[in-house]
Image (cartoon, helix red, strand yellow):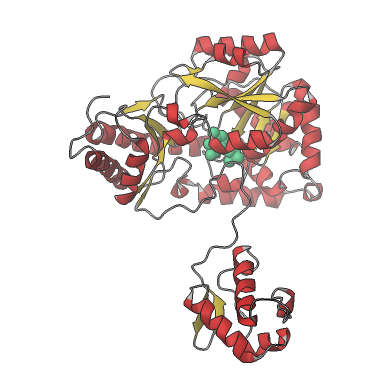
Amino acid sequence: MPWNTLIDVSREHVLPLTVQIQENIKREISEGALHPGTRLPSSRQLAEDLGVSRSVVVEAYGQLVAEGYLEAAQGSGTRVAAHLTTAPQTPTLLADSRPAPVARWDLRAHNADPAAFPEREWLAAYQRAVRRMEPRELGYPPLSGLTALRAELAGYLGRARGVHTTREHIMVVAGFAQALGMVCEVLPRLGIGTLAVEDPCHPQQRQFIGESGLRCRPVPVDEDGIDVAALARSGARAVLVTPTHQFPTGVVLSAERRAALVRWAQEVDGWIVEDDYDGDLWLAHGRRPTALQRLDPSRVLYAGTASKSLAPGMRLGWLAVPPRLRGPLEEARARRDLGCEAFTQLAFAEFLATGLFDRHLRRRRARLRARAEIFQQAVRRHLPGARITGSMAGLHAGLQLPHRVDEPSLVAQALRRSVLVRGGRTYHHRPWLARPSLVVGYASPARSALAEAVRELGEACADLTGGHRLRTA
Ligand SMILES: Cc1ncc(COP(=O)(O)O)c(C=O)c1O
């Protein structure tokens, strides 16, 4: 490759040639064209490509090595330093793309438990599915998903979540992130310009909705879930909710509020998007709430995902679509891509049909329940003034702190003790008004590490309060 396409120098420029080469290389590294570890041409080669003397390149390389941009190793030439990160990735809907500080205990909410992935069973299902695949299934899949998977999902959602739907109304998507993108595209076509969200909620979702051109209207959440009266006052005609396990507080939408929410949608001729992101992973004893969708399948768009129950890397989700939204959503889907990858769809259909998913969920719930219990005990012991909010489900819990705790100082002090945790205020529309809290993911650390991490959180609190343990709220 002639390097003068990337590195462009001119004798007319006010800057010396050496500096121009350095600036060009730094720019290409920061913009992501030159990746960490990329080998640069020899100084002789680059000098030839650029039409400059070799000493100019040698000096430029030397300076970049001194500044840490390049590494020079005997025998392997000059490379872009391995520790440098490439260009910032395009922000995705849900993932926090900021590099996380290194910590011994990582208690962030989105952390999955990679060890819980049912590798053997998944491989077996995948193999069977690929072996049985028919030639037509190697073509472009139907936009809404393969019939076999949609039939399995309709059955599963009915028996496991009480969803009222049929295979014709199931749509397979690349995770909830894609579904939300489609919803944001479809609502304005239905004459809706505002999408209400819960406050607190996922900050990236709030940002995404705002950037999609819709108005995003945060509506407060209390112990019973979203405040439906406040929603009605907001003037919105569509809302995104997490009724089974509110994200991030964990509260469950009460029966009265469920009924009121559906009544509101009927009265305003509006829509409810039910994000049932961890509905498969109800851990508390006692009855798990069924999907809100069953109260009015014509108004509630139900969304599920494999991200919490299996792995976010699968990029697999599903919708149970109200009949009136089916056409618009299919059109929106057609504008986006040509459907979800068929192999994973067939394998997941097999996984559902053979009962492997149910078995996996039973094991996963038992594993998570054990961790949730350790977490609860550790909180009682080391953070007695804190209160776990809502119900135990999924991979995380909300932890309310006494008013006097300064949340940002606690998060910073926890990190000094090598615990990486997110403060609850980051999820709020108006963080300065929110009560101090933490959002704690308990799925990924080993059980013993989990108790240690909470103990360190307790110590971090004590550091801030002059050695006193956190007492009453
Ligand atoms: C509130 C919420 N909804 C949905 C999802 C899942 O999104 P996806 O299916 O795109 O992975 C997540 C994952 O972190 C989430 O936190």
> How far from the left and from the top, in percent, is residue 340?
72, 44
Q: Nearer the viewer, residue 28 or 323?
A: 28
| Image position of 443 with respect to 166: above or below | below
Give the quarter the ligand 1 occupies: top right
Residue at image location 46% in from the left, 16% down from the top:
224
Tell me where residue 188 sits by quadrant: top right
| Image position of 338 with respect to 296: above or below | below
| Image position of 204 with respect to 229: above or below | below
Residue situated furthest front in the rendering: 14
Does residue 449 appear to the left or right of 341 in the view shown? left
Residue at image location 70% in from the left, 73% down from the top:
6
> How far from the left and from the top, in percent, is residue 3?
71, 79
Q: In the rendered image, which quarter contains the C terminus? A: top left
Q: Nearer the viewer, residue 323 or 159?
A: 323
Does residue 52 appear to the left or right of 352 in the view shown? right
Q: In the rendered image, which quarter contains the N terminus? A: bottom right
Is residue 305 something one can see in this rendering?
A: no
Tell me where residue 14 sits by quadrant: bottom right
> How far from the left and from the top, in percent, is residue 246?
49, 26
Does residue 164 appear to the left or right of 362 in the view shown? right
> How far from the left and from the top, in percent, is residue 355?
56, 36
Residue at image location 20% in from the left, 35% down from the top:
469
Q: How many marks?
A: 0
Residue situated furthest left in the rendering: 467
Residue at image location 60% in from the left, 90% down from the top:
55
Q: Nearer the viewer, residue 389 or 149?
A: 389
Is residue 341 something one can see in this rendering?
A: yes
Does residue 430 appear to the left or right of 353 in the view shown? left
